[in-house]
Amino acid sequence: MNDAHLHLVVNHFPIIGTILGLGILIAGIVLNNKSVQNTAYVLFVISAVFGFFSMSTGEGAEEMVEDFAGIGKAIIHEHEEMAEKLAIVLYALAITSLFGLYSNLKNKPKAKLVSYIATVVAIIAVFFAQQTGTTGGEVRHTEIRTDSAAVDNNIEKITPAIEEEKE
């Protein structure tokens, strides 16, 4: 399994895990249920771990696909920039979540405050997760790019040239 394959395997969990974790955390706050909140905190920590793995495999994946037709370095760079921002927020969310777990398990008076802080950080993480997922999808899915018409025109120009080279 190469880095591109590994990246595709692990890169979805930080996004989906953060979104699910946010919903679970909000439910835990509304229901005033520490077990539900703790579930969200664990999910956030796991999402950050998978975020680390995604960042670790991203460079190798970039090296494999950056010269493919219709991709280019600019679109990968945009995805990489968003992924770096998401990683920072996920790491902050994981640290906040560890404080939340500790506060809940030890019945600390600041547990409620930590849950609100984690909710705010998780909302920020979900924003960056959406941006990272979209820019990552745009690497190979030209149909979702805002400049997809330009990409389609470039591919139409490239395809005949490639076919001529084959002849």
Image (spheres, rainbow, N blue to C red):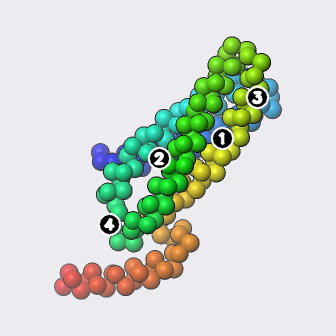
Distance between the alpha carbons at the discs numbered 4 and 2: 21 Å
Please identify the residue farthest to the top as the structure is shown: 106
Q: Quadrant of the N terminus?
A: top left
Tell me if residue 11 can be seen.
Answer: yes
Q: Are marks 4 and 3 in contact (CB under 8 Å)?
A: no
Badge nearest the viewer, 4 or 3? 3
Q: Residues within 10 Å of mark 1 (few under 14, many from 20)?
A: many
First of labels 2, 3 by sequence position: 2
Q: CA distance from mark 1 to mark 3?
A: 14 Å
Q: Foreground mark, 1 or 3?
A: 3
Residue 75 appears in which quarter of the rendering?
Answer: bottom left
**Which corner quadrant of the image does residue 131 belong to?**
bottom right
Q: Quadrant of the C terminus?
A: bottom left
**What is the distance, in whole Å, between disc 2 and disc 3 at their CAs?**
30 Å
Q: CA distance from mark 1 to mark 4?
A: 35 Å
| Secondary-structure class at tag 1 | helix
Where's residue 17, x and y in %?
Answer: 58, 40
**Element at label 4:** loop
Q: Which residue is mark 3?
A: 113
| Location of mark 2 (residue) | 11
126 above or below 35? Answer: below
- Residue 85 coordinates in the image, percent (x, y): 54, 49
Residue at 53% x, 75% y: name it.
147
SS state under label 2 = loop
Is label 4 or label 2 in front?
Answer: 4
Question: Which mark is in front, 2 or 3?
Answer: 3
Q: Residue at the left extreme? A: 167
User: Crowding at label 4, few (<14), some or many (≥20) Cα neighbours within 10 Å?
Assistant: few
